[in-house]
Image (cartoon, coloured by chain):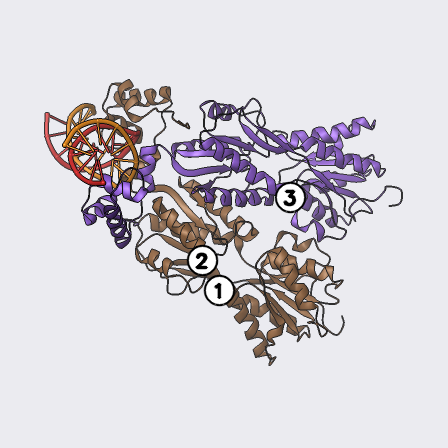
Chain colours: A purple, B brown, C red, D orange
Amino acid sequence: MPATRKGVTLKDVAAAANVSRATAARALNSYGYVGDETATRVVEAADRLGYRANRVAQALRSGQLPIVGFVPGDIQNPFFARIAHDLEVEFRKQGHGLLISSSEENVEQEKAVLESLRSLSIRGFILAPTSATDNRHIVKLAREGAPLVLIDRVAKDVRCDSVVVDNEGGAREAVDYLIANGHRRIALLRDESRIFTAQERFAGYQGALQSHGIALDETLVTVSRSTVEHAIEATIRLFSRRDRPTALFTVDSLMTQGALLGLRSMGLTIPHDVALVGFDDFNLATFTDPQITVVAQPIAEIGPLAASFLLERLAGQKIPPRNVRFPTRLVVRGSVAPLNKA
Amino acid sequence: MPATRKGVTLKDVAAAANVSRATAARALNSYGYVGDETATRVVEAADRLGYRANRVAQALRSGQLPIVGFVPGDIQNPFFARIAHDLEVEFRKQGHGLLISSSEENVEQEKAVLESLRSLSIRGFILAPTSATDNRHIVKLAREGAPLVLIDRVAKDVRCDSVVVDNEGGAREAVDYLIANGHRRIALLRDESRIFTAQERFAGYQGALQSHGIALDETLVTVSRSTVEHAIEATIRLFSRRDRPTALFTVDSLMTQGALLGLRSMGLTIPHDVALVGFDDFNLATFTDPQITVVAQPIAEIGPLAASFLLERLAGQKIPPRNVRFPTRLVVRGSVAPLNKA
DNA sequence: CTGAAAGCGCTAACAA
DNA sequence: TTGTTAGCGCTTTCAG
């Protein structure tokens, strides 16, 4: 009753062309032997009738729908939106659709989404695991041989292709830079430690402090969900104290934006009152005054590479997992001033 | 060979529980009569075996995959990313996946994408038509009874549900505001006129000028693709002339961002040298100095309403098309100064 | 070169 | 209450 009952099936085409369904299929998909004349007759009939192959039926036979699933943490994060776009373009070229189903950074939802995709006979998965540790479901997925590429984050003990960036190194470089500018009381605005990138970036932060002989001050580290709103709040919390930090490192672009807003609302100026460096570049980092210094990721390369990895797996390629880690790049702009001069 | 060949089918479950496939199905989907004891036996067997219904097979029978297609103009535009997120949430609640396939503002691609979705027996469509006029394919889709909701833009002669905003009114209000501040040479940065919203927003611009007795100066209107990069270029073109405009109205947030960058690169300051109003609010409109005055759309309402419309259609509801048009709201911030004072 | 027939996994008449 | 059977639309042996 709902619709889409166009109803022109292979049977109709075959009948119209006076051949069997088998022959019609051969003509339409050009395989096997078909007489030239017969073939054209079939194709014409198909055109005339407006035949469109039923991909669900094809999928039932082949066991696979020409769809790939993408499970990001949050599609509204420009980082994932960009990757979604790039993936879509790549898969489209190969006749595959991209089914996007966000985990909303919730492990249970991630499990549910993955289950749901599997029952759809999706061909493969591109996943940004929301948890670095709670991931038996992913291990299982990989074990069962499902084509799978991890992106942005890897999950412990999962053997499969992955494409990530050097989170620790990037974070370290950022904090080193802050230290080089004379800062010692450097706050960190991070997201939940369950998340792989959060752990690595935190490690980089710690490492930088340590190698400069600065003790880690737990009270300078604040956890927040990765949204502008939450980050604003967390920033205000961080800077409300008397002996407030002189610098802030934020672990993703949404948080950087939240920090900007939070600091502004407190009347704190950058870089005069607070030096700021953020992980992940964003469109508007160059709009603010001053422009924001960031750790940039090679975002344009991540999606295409992940897509090509998955496509190779879909083509049946059997090689050991490839684990690519891209370097990051510190883009110095104007949000950090030397502590003394400021 | 590729995988996902878990291979536990209903048949296996039935065998394990010593019942027929029909009974197993009844127990699992709880319909028809099944003995209590039998039912639990089946359910247990299913659990034990890790049975997962094959939704492709179900779809072949029912003729419909529990997936809805979303065809935005560009998933990287935060406007569409937000809507994609909201749609996903709504459809997930109803057990439906969301297949996102961008038209990239290209009619041919839109047609191809729609064809592809149809051959997948997708249940329904949420579409932002890329062309206001070249849309016979959409008319056809609607005629054939495919559940369809148009979003952000409507297409001529298509009878179906739609959810849009008052583009003309919003644009008019923006330009009125500029005029009220003494501006007369008001430039327009718009996207291709093929796009519905572009037409309407242009009409609003014209209408405002006209009702204040200001002649339309074609040289003040520039067309650009809706990306930050293109908009930068277009802005520079617009403001490179001697008698440059004193104000600028941009028709979407990506263009507004491009305009900001373009003006900055020319050393023009806002609102001193140029007054600026943009259509569509964006995250960072409040980060800039000054903050940007915009025409805000009730974006949080669009996705959920469109989803509920489509869901009702999927449920078989037969009522005349509903065409909702939300009002916009001028959010005055600091990017416009009175012409004389400036 | 072409056709007949089987079967992918599931559901729904219809029988029993 | 349960089983039998047919068939969704397609592809692919296997005969002819």
**How far, Cα to Cα, is label 1 from label 3?**
33 Å
Disc 2: which chain?
A: B
Q: Earlier in the sequence, mark 1 or mark 2?
A: 2
Q: Which residue is mark 3?
A: A254
Q: Position of residue B243 (x, y in %)?
A: 71, 75
Q: Secondary structure at mark 2?
A: helix
Q: Which residue is mark 1?
A: B194
Disc 1: which chain?
A: B
Residues packed near mark 3 inside 10 Å, few (<14), some (14 to 19) or many (20 plus): many
Left or right: residue A294 compared with residue B140? right
Disc nearest the viewer among 1 and 3: 1
Q: Which residue is mark 2?
A: B107
Please give the name of the residue rendered at 57% of the width and 51% of the height, measured from the top-left corner. B78
Left or right: residue B152 compared with residue A30? right
Q: Position of residue B332 (x, y in %)?
A: 65, 63
From this viewpoint, is residue B30 visible? no
Who is closer to the viewer here, A322 or B132? A322
Quadrant the C terminus of chain B occupies:
bottom right
Could you tell me if the residues under marks 1 and 2 are in contact, i.e. CB atoms within 8 Å? yes
